[in-house]
Image (cartoon, rainbow, N blue to C red):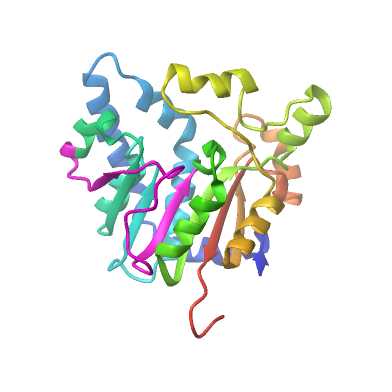
Amino acid sequence: MYRNQNQQTLVNTLRKQNMDYKPVLHNTASEIIELSLKKQTDSYYQSFWKSQAWRVEETLANLVTHLESKRKLIVDIGCNPPILLASIKNLGYQTIGLDINPDSFREYIEQFNLSTVKCDIDNQMLPFEDNSVDAIVLAEVFEHLRINPLFTLSETYRVLRPGGFLLLSTPNLHSLKGIKNFLLKGNNYSCASNIFKEFNKINTIGYFGHIREYTWQEMNSLLQEIGYVEQNNIFSGGATKNPSLAPIYSLIPTLRPVLHILAFKPSPEKP
């Protein structure tokens, strides 16, 4: 079952009941950025937050809106920068972060008392028992997977409890920018630079850039094949730098650049 932007009114109503996430997120981000700037050579977190704050806020909003209580175990996969992970913890949820190299942000893990586990989700099983996790966040990670994305999705499905959900965000290749890049530039990306720079990141920063971006239709199909049901598509972003595009996005929200999908593992009473 697919639900697109016509669900947004309900989502917005629910978010108003969970508004405490906003100050927590922004205060946590400020603390992490302040700590990073004390290192003098590290301004990455500051630049990340400047360009990506709206997307992280959208991810956190979608997460807290759909959690029934704070007695939930949430796994944040690819948790560096740890702004989202620390914010979830500061909101009172039990959370564990997975990352390919937690040592690269060990100072922040210790400062904010975060629980993290080293895991290469391209190659390794998730370190959790079957049906043991309430929610998984896979934010802006899926487009970086290069070996077996189906294995990774299957692992998220395995560890989620029945009725639990995967919150996945990824660039929307079928966005206005993605379509424009393909038609005018022959470039099969919407939110990336070029194929050489993306692939070369493995040599410069230690992990691949965008291996491939996906249309929202492709993502829905993948998740359905894995077994997920009741997929809620929420499209966001796109008009911040160019407000003139707002009417287009309002009329056709599927053209927005970022896709968030809430995909639920079926429960016994809802097969």
Identify whether 270 is placed above or below 243.
below
Residue in front for this viewpoint, 120 or 75? 120
- Name the side, left or right, on which 183 lies relative to 101: right
What type of secondary structure mainly makes up the magenta span?
loop
Residue 8 in view here: no
Identify whether 232 is placed above or below 260.
below
Residue 244 among those drawn in magenta: no
In magenta, the rendered stretch is 110-139
Residue 246 in view here: yes
- Name the side, left or right, on which 29 lies relative to 196: left
Identify whether 182 is placed above or below 152.
above
Quadrant housing residue 38:
top left
Residue in front for this viewpoint, 105 or 100? 100
Residue 131 among those drawn in magenta: yes
Identify whether 63 is placed above or below 200.
below
Q: Position of residue 161 (x, y in %)?
A: 40, 70
- Name the side, left or right, on which 40 lies relative to 20: left
Residue in front for this viewpoint, 13 or 174? 174
On-image quarter of the C terminus: bottom right
Number of numbered tags placed on the structure image: 0
Quadrant housing residue 232:
bottom right
Q: Position of residue 28 (x, y in %)?
A: 28, 41
Q: Position of residue 131 (x, y in %)?
A: 38, 69
Q: Residue at x 64, y 38 (%)?
A: 213
Q: Residue at x 32, y 59 (%)?
A: 128
Q: Residue at x 75, y 50 (%)?
A: 252
